[in-house]
């Protein structure tokens, strides 16, 4: 009995080690996490540690962006910020990043080593970043003359007022611990500040890593302590004003979590849970690296006591619970993974990879075109996996965007483990070069149900790359065989569906924002009559989806708005949804007769495509009812919180974006 018990314990330890969630990225070194919510996803900016010297010290010039919507599977968006490219002018280092979100923009705060702090902004977390300039310099009159002018943290209060926290210094610095951290009000533009700054007092053994979050009416100011008491713990204070005064409360995260050396942490609320992101040295240890500042970001759950104090966080290998299953019927960026093995790395593509796939509604990060991220350094036997993947209807095909200079490579789709049940194999042909992308469709036999782990196992000698993929089932209502046109959106219909291929011609894909675009010609083959074509786009002050009626000859794009492109054609009495609309060529579409009788449900599992929604003619004599993307009723008043919502008015169902 004792022997059996020991074997069981050993098995549990083995599984926990092999499938530990922390650190969240293992293909590169990352540190100094700043977490924030954008749309329906949790994002983290982190310092890119790969270029640090092998002995000691730092050489940080890039920020890595990562995101998740289930707290288990993370998308590596690559090094989206470069100090040499994105500024501010004259900066040559980019130490721990700070970030804040306001008015649908991201504000990135960049320390130039410890000598100053700059700011840049973007309309998406992945950039591009613009308007970079210096925000803070050491100045006695401004009360910014701290030993280390770095570690900025942006914070936006519930009233919309922004703040920035920064500073730090050694134990023998001037000013010293307890007086070396600062806070200041930001201007309405989030790129200017009101001086002089406020000195944060009472921060026992303050060292670096200033951070602010708010829970209810209480402000929590956290920071890293120095090593004079043996370890650089993450401590915190509380107050009723974002500028203090604050009362010291104690340790929030013991330094044992970091594995020695410094630490840097940030707290964020996401989908009704609280989390703390921090860095440790687990990946360095796993890689048997004995020296150098090679850190790795981990995430754990944070909880409060009934009196509002924070329960001391226990750093874990397992990480927080996964909060929902992963949806394989949405477009998956190939850099989305739970874990990976071998030499696999991630990178931003040096050449665009549109192929037959056009992104819309932030399917890929960025604001213009297709920002390509990819898996590289793929070798025979290496793999990536996803956790808790819900194949509701199974899958009969796998579509992958790949680039390869030669044939000989393949992808095995397996469940359970890298040697588990084989659902199918997808051969990767020569596409014409390592930057020439092609969408490859392969037949598979994936049974229905939730798969604990889904593996893509790479085989062969061909050094191919992959950028995106998607699974399709025989009963899926996805509207296209191209990757970005797919969706998990489901709408109930009064009758069955069938597939037909339509051609879109006479459409200029290189339109200039704000200009008129010629109406396209749509043909669906012999025996199918095409009626009016519609293109829906985000326009007008209300940011609602506007249509193009049968009397119009042009669609109009409002300057500065992001297009949501859906095209609806009428074949006889049947409505068909076609996506994407802003391309010429052939697309497989799903045609559904009758009108939708329920609100569509959507569950995005990655930076996926725009969900396809069947549109009926807009009704004007019925009250509007608003729903979440999960179908939850929200009442008749337009939601005020930014996000995507479903509007039902009579038989009409449409989506709106509230900015």
Image: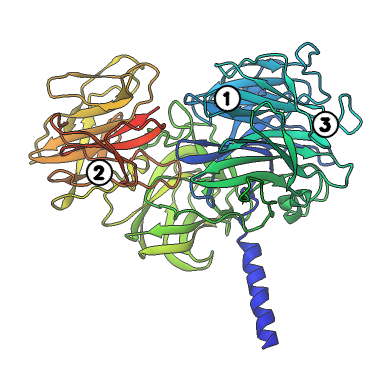
Observer-nearest residue: 535 or 545? 545
Observer-nearest residue: 628 or 86? 628
| Few, some or many residues within 10 Å of mark 3 (<14, 14–19, 20+) | some
Looking at the image, which residue is at 72% across and 40% down? 236
Closer mark to the observer between disc 3 and disc 2 = 3
Quarter of the figure with residue 10:
bottom right
Real-space Cα separation, disc 3 to disc 2, in angstroms: 64 Å
Q: Verify CB contact (< 8 Å) between mark 3 and mark 2.
A: no
The mark that comes first in sequence, 3 or 1, is 1
Residue 49 seen from this side: no
Looking at the image, which residue is at 78% across and 45% down? 233
The residue indicated by pointer 3 is 178
x%, y% of residue 627? 30, 41
Real-space Cα separation, disc 1 to disc 2, in angstroms: 40 Å
Asked which secondary structure carries label 3, the reply is: loop
Q: Is residue 138 left or right of residue 459?
A: right
Q: In this view, does 537 lie above or below 373?
A: above
x%, y% of residue 5? 66, 82
The residue indicated by pointer 2 is 588
Residue 438 seen from this side: yes
Looking at the image, which residue is at 17% across and 49% down? 493
Question: In the rendered view of the protein, which quadrant contains the C terminus?
Answer: top left
Closer mark to the observer between disc 1 and disc 2 = 1
The residue at the far bottom in this view is 1
């Amino acid at each position: 009995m004792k022997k059996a018990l020991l074997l069981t314990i050993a098995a549990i330890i083995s599984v926990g080690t092999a499938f530990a969630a922390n650190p969240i990225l293992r293909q590169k070194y990352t540190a100094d996490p700043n977490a924030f919510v954008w749309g329906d996803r949790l994002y983290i900016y982190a310092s890119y540690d790969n270029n640090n010297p092998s002995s000691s010290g730092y050489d940080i010039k890039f920020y890595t962006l990562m995101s998740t919507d289930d707290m288990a599977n993370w998308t590596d968006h690559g090094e989206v910020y470069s100090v040499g490219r994105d500024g501010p002018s004259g900066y040559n280092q980019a130490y721990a990043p700070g970030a804040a979100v306001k008015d649908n923009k991201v504000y990135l705060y960049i320390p130039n080593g410890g000598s100053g702090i700059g700011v840049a902004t973007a309309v998406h977390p992945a950039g591009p970043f613009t308007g970079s300039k210096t925000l803070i310099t050491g100045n006695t009159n401004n009360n910014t003359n701290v030993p280390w002018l770095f570690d900025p943290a942006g914070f936006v209060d519930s009233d919309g007022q922004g703040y920035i926290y920064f500073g730090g210094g050694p134990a023998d610095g001037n000013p010293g611990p307890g007086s070396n951290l600062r806070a200041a009000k930001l201007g309405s533009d989030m790129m200017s500040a009101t001086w002089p700054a406020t000195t944060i007092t009472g921060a026992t053994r303050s060292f670096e890593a200033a951070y602010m979050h708010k829970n209810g009416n209480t402000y929590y100011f956290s920071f890293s302590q120095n090593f004079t008491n043996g370890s650089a713990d993450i401590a915190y204070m509380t107050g009723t004003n974002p500028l203090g005064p604050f009362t010291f409360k104690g340790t929030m995260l013991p330094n044992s979590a970091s594995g020695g050396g410094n630490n840097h942490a940030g707290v964020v609320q996401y989908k009704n849970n609280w989390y703390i992101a921090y860095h440790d040295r687990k990946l360095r240890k796993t890689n048997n690296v004995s020296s150098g500042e090679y850190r790795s970001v981990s995430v754990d759950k944070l909880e409060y006591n009934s009196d509002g104090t924070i329960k001391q966080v226990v750093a874990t290998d397992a990480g927080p619970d996964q909060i929902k299953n992963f949806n394989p019927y949405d477009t998956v960026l190939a850099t989305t993974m739970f874990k990976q093995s071998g030499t696999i790395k991630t990178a931003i593509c040096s050449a665009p990879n549109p192929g037959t796939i056009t992104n819309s509604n932030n399917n890929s990060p960025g604001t213009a075109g297709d920002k390509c991220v990819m898996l590289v350094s793929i070798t025979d036997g290496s793999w990536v996996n996803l956790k808790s993947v819900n194949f509701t209807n199974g899958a009969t095909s796998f579509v992958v965007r790949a680039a390869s200079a030669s044939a000989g490579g393949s992808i095995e789709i397996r469940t359970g483990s890298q040697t588990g049940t084989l659902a199918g194999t997808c051969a990767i042909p020569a596409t014409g070069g390592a930057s020439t992308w092609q969408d490859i469709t392969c037949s598979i036999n994936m049974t229905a149900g939730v798969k604990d782990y889904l593996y893509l196992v790479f085989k062969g000698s061909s050094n191919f790359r992959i950028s995106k993929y998607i699974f399709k089932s025989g009963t899926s209502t996805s509207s296209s065989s191209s990757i970005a046109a797919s969706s998990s959106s489901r709408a109930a219909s009064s009758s069955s569906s069938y597939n037909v291929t339509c051609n879109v011609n006479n459409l200029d894909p290189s339109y200039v924002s704000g200009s008129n675009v010629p109406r396209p010609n749509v043909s669906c083959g012999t025996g199918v009559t095409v009626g009016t074509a519609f293109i829906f786009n985000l326009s007008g002050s209300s940011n609602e989806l506007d249509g193009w009626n049968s009397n119009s000859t042009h669609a109009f794009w409002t300057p500065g708005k992001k297009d949501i492109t859906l095209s609806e054609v009428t074949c006889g009495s049947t409505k068909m949804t076609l996506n994407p609309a802003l391309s010429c060529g052939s697309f497989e579409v799903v045609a559904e007769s009758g009108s939708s009788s329920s609100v569509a449900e959507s569950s995005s599992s990655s930076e996926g495509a725009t969900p396809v929604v069947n549109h009926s003619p807009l009704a004007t004599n019925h009250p509007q009812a608003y729903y979440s993307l999960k179908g939850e009723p929200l009442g008749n008043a337009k939601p005020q919180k930014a996000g995507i919502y479903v509007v039902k008015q009579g038989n009409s169902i449409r989506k709106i974006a509230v900015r």
